[in-house]
Image (spheres, grey):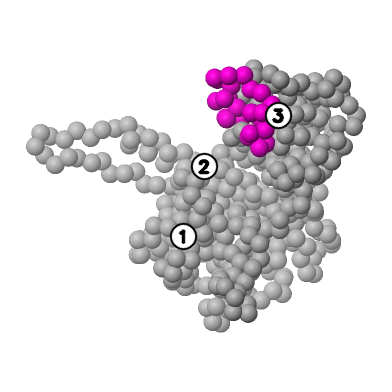
Amino acid sequence: MQTIAKLRILADAAKYDASCASSGVKGRDSLGGKGMGSAEGMGICHSYTPDGRCVSLLKILLTNFCIYDCRYCINRKSSNVQRARFTAAEVVALTLDFYRRNCIEGLFLSSGIIQSSNYTMEQLVEVARSLREDHDFRGYIHLKTIPDADPQLLALAGRHADRLSINIELPTSQGLQQLAPEKSASGIASAMGDVARHIDEARQEGQAHAAQKPVSLPGAQRARRARPARYAPGGQSTQMIVGADGASDAVILRTSSALYTGHRLRRVYYSAFSPIPNASADLPLQAPPLIREHRLYQADWLMRFYGFAHEEIIAPGATGMLDLEIDPKLAWALAHRQHFPINLNRAPKEWLLRVPGLGGRSVERLLAARSVRSLRLADLQQLHVASAKVLAFVELADYHPRPGALESAQLREQLIAQMAQGAVQRRHSGMHLTAAGQMALF
């Protein structure tokens, strides 16, 4: 099979891996001789480096052959999709070729399981090793690792990769047992623990190295200590399939919270289940609404950056599902109206972050502004925040909510109607989302 044919198959197969963020561009191409390049199809995605730069990555599978038969996976053993496989040398050559042509700045590499977990992991590590050691490649490398591979292979992978990820697959061990019985939840957790331990050790060695100043003899060349070995400086991430089993949003967020605290994951990605041909009867016939995936990302953001606990976002005893009509922070505020209105001139930062429509950057600007004068309604308008949501829950020096407005039974409907009118409000609420795409190689 020619390389371009392999590339089409294995770049398309990699699109299901959400743990490498897509670019979200609109589809466009140069058919008809107009323009240059294409933003359709698969093959290149964007991701963020530890220092915050957005980089383009070649996103492919080493192979879509697999000895496992996970029922939710398009590449499962019993699937009749067209198969292809790259050698490690071919992936190295492709990466360098695209890099030299300035198409990419790094590599995202995942794989089906061939022969054994250890053999597959050896091939993935060989790609990263060859790029780093044989070709002095200094671009970004994200490796999707095999959880039940030998721990020494995971250790080697982290020496060469900037980020490692291990898919947790499903939110519960029961769901994994039902839909992917050949995989082990305890094995996945153990591998994540090993990666977390290696990352911590590397970080501590780096801090100790930075704190120690070498002493040189007078007149001698300045001594330098050897740098400690690096290990996945971009941390580790994982991906969870949403809607393939019966797990509620509350269970999904509880699992994510445990991953963030237990294994200090940098990011949990949520991937809405896509129905596959000839699927098992255990799987739903329809995909969950994409807005559910969007709400989960919003809730995840609240846990990581806004100080919310997972049990606050979905209260115990509720349906266990996020409200699809409004964002999780607004849903929380409407359910806890006794805490509002928040005085923007006096409230601490942690309460400002709980005001619907106020993001972290807006809160920082408000804190800076109120340190020199009282905040007024005009200050809020200058920030271009989602004012319809904000004004319902705050008070300022020259603004107070209408008496009884917060207690009104129609407040929710009023806010939804107002959010539908403005671009900023629509973006905050998740309404009219633009379909995500990925940059194409073809």
Mark positioned earlier in the residue sequence (3 or 2): 2
Label 1 to label 3: alpha-carbon separation = 38 Å
Nearer mark to the viewer, of 1 and 2: 1
Query: What residue would you read off at disc 2?
Result: 196
Q: Which residues are magenta?
A: 363-385
Query: What residue would you read off at disc 1?
Result: 105
Residue 188 in view: no
Q: Splitting the image into 4 quarters, where does residue 117 fall?
A: bottom right
- Single out the residue that lies furthest toward the left: 219
**For residue 340, above or below residue 272:** above
Q: Amino acid at mark 3?
A: Val
Task: Locate residue 435, reporting x and y percent.
Answer: 71, 58
Q: Amino acid at mark 1?
A: Glu
User: Mark 1: few, some, or many residues within 10 Å (few <14, many ≥20)?
Assistant: many
Does the magenta portion include 380? yes
Q: Amino acid at mark 2?
A: Ala
| Residue drawn where x is 41% and y is 36% of the image | 204
Label 3 to label 2: alpha-carbon separation = 34 Å
Q: Contact, CB < 8 Å: mark 1 with mark 2?
A: no
Q: Splitting the image into 4 quarters, where does residue 45 fall?
A: bottom right
Residue 355: numbered disc? 3
Relative placement, left or right, of 252 versus 198 is right
| Residue drawn where x is 76% and y is 52% of the image | 432
Relative placement, left or right, of 242 versus 269 is right
Residue 300: numbered disc? none
Nearer mark to the viewer, of 3 and 2: 3
Q: Contact, CB < 8 Å: mark 3 with mark 2?
A: no
